[in-house]
């Protein structure tokens, strides 16, 4: 029996949400919390029971990430990148790589991070990758820098994308490899607790067994699949932000008065609450459609996930912004969660494909449907 959304909701309400402001302020997640995540089987529940996972379907995984996102987007982001690495090893790894890494990833004994973005390129522009891996006998020498690496400060295993001639390849790099240097990136606007880092690879020697997936073809294989898994998690986590904004706003307006009337009776505020409910329900339907398509191994899941992520992330920003407005000056204070929700929500519109990139991609599909 794997983790259920109901179990995760209890965990979030007891151990995550009440401490989320502290996690955000200190820019760290305590080791004790990460161990609880592992004991609940939340790191990679979609992995099979044979390797220590739960064999959970993606609809269930999405609901779990929604609950985590409702409590703390920093923690949900950690689950996202770890899931991207776990999925990639499970899909593209050799038998030896799977035997070595999957049980560790399933339990959380090894924490995996996704290393694509670089400091001198535009976000995750894979065509501008400056990190290179050069052949060295039977192995490789890896040189370059990666930035904005979620969980990088506590990474054990890094899935690194690097140029290998005309194409790109993916490599599994242990943090303990000589030449790996991790530098924290502090004071992020949102998801501050996700322990983001810049990672430098200075002539890191790797064996042939570090290569993950086909040489020179990672952009269309390992990277594409991992980003789809990440995008799905971000969509579901964004849905959690909408839910958290709704809950905070409903409680606040039910308790506070202005001019002798409860705020809940103000038409303008009721309109904002109704917008949150509508956008939440639409986001949930889109996320669950993407999850069902993943469970069916339907290629349409790629576009369904783009759409879910686009709607859910923009809905999260709108809902969190409205929640701040509803709370007034209190909405700008760390004494209430909505300021953090707003900062976290804005990050969701940038990571795993910006809002603008998603609009272009979705529009391309619309034109093909109508004109071809």
Image (cartoon, helix red, strand yellow):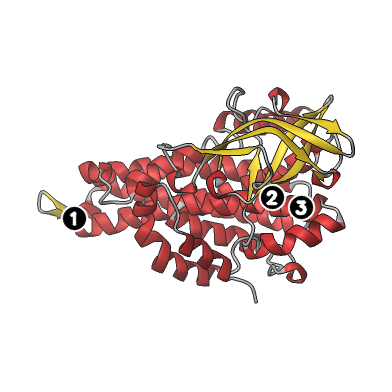
Q: Quadrant of residue 367?
A: top right
Q: Quadrant of residue 163?
A: top right
- Residue drawn where x is 56% and y is 62% of the image: 64
- For the C terminus, the quadrant is top right
Front-most of 23 and 282? Answer: 23
**Res 85 label:** 2
**Res 204 label:** none
Q: Quadrant of residue 103?
A: bottom right
Image location (x, y in percent) of residue 50 = 77, 71
- Residue drawn where x is 69% and y is 50% of the image: 85
Front-most of 236 and 277? Answer: 236
Q: Spatial distance from mark 2 to mark 1, Cα to Cα?
A: 45 Å
Q: Spatial distance from mark 2 to mark 3, Cα to Cα?
A: 6 Å
Residue of label 1: 256
Q: Nearer the viewer, mark 3 or mark 1?
A: 3
Front-most of 155 and 57? Answer: 155
- Residue drawn where x is 60% and y is 58% of the image: 62
* Badge 2 density bin: few <14, some 14–19, many ≥20, Cα 10 Å: many
Q: Nearer the viewer, mark 2 or mark 1?
A: 2
Image location (x, y in percent) of residue 208 = 85, 43
Q: Is residue 112 left or right of residue 70?
A: right
Q: Is residue 31 above or below residue 242?
A: below
Residue of label 3: 89
Quick one: label 2 or label 1, which is nearer the N terminus?
A: 2
Secondary structure category for the residue under label 1: loop
- For the N terminus, the quadrant is bottom right
Secondary structure category for the residue under label 2: helix
């Amino acid at each position: 029996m794997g983790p259920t959304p109901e179990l995760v909701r209890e965990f979030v309400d007891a151990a995550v949400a009440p401490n989320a402001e502290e996690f955000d302020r200190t820019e760290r997640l305590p080791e004790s919390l990460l161990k609880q995540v592992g004991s609940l089987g939340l790191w990679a529940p979609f992995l099979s029971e044979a390797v220590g996972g739960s064999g959970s379907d993606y609809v269930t995984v999405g609901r779990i990430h929604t609950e985590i996102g409702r409590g703390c987007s920093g923690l949900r982001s950690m689950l996202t990148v770890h899931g991207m690495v776990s999925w990639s090893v499970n899909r593209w790894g050799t038998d030896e790589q799977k035997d070595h890494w999957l049980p560790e990833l399933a339990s959380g004994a090894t924490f995996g991070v996704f290393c694509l973005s670089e400091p001198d390129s535009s976000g995750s522009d894979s065509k501008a990758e400056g990190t290179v891996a050069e052949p060295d006998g039977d192995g490789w020498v890896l040189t370059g820098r990666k930035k904005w690496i979620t969980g990088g400060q506590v990474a054990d295993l890094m899935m690194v994308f690097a140029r290998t001639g005309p194409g790109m390849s993916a490599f599994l790099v242990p943090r303990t490899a000589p030449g790996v240097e991790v530098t924290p990136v502090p004071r992020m606007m949102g998801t501050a607790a996700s322990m983001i880092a810049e990672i430098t690879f200075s002539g890191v020697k790797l064996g042939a067994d570090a290569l993950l997936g086909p040489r020179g073809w990672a952009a269309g294989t390992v990277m594409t699949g991992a980003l789809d898994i990440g995008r799905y998690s971000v969509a579901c986590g964004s849905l959690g932000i909408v839910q958290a904004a709704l809950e905070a706003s409903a409680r606040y307006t039910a308790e506070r008065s202005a001019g002798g009337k409860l705020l809940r009776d103000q038409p303008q505020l009721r309109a904002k609450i109704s917008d949150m409910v509508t956008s939440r329900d639409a986001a949930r339907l889109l996320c669950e459609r993407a999850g069902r398509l993943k469970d069916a191994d339907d290629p349409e899941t790629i576009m369904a996930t783009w759409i879910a992520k686009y709607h859910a992330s923009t809905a999260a920003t709108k809902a969190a912004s409205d929640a701040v407005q509803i709370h007034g000056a209190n909405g700008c204070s760390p004494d209430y969660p909505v300021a953090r929700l707003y900062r976290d929500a804005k990050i969701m519109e940038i990571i795993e494909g910006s809002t603008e990139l998603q609009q272009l991609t979705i529009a391309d599909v619309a034109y093909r449907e109508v004109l071809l």
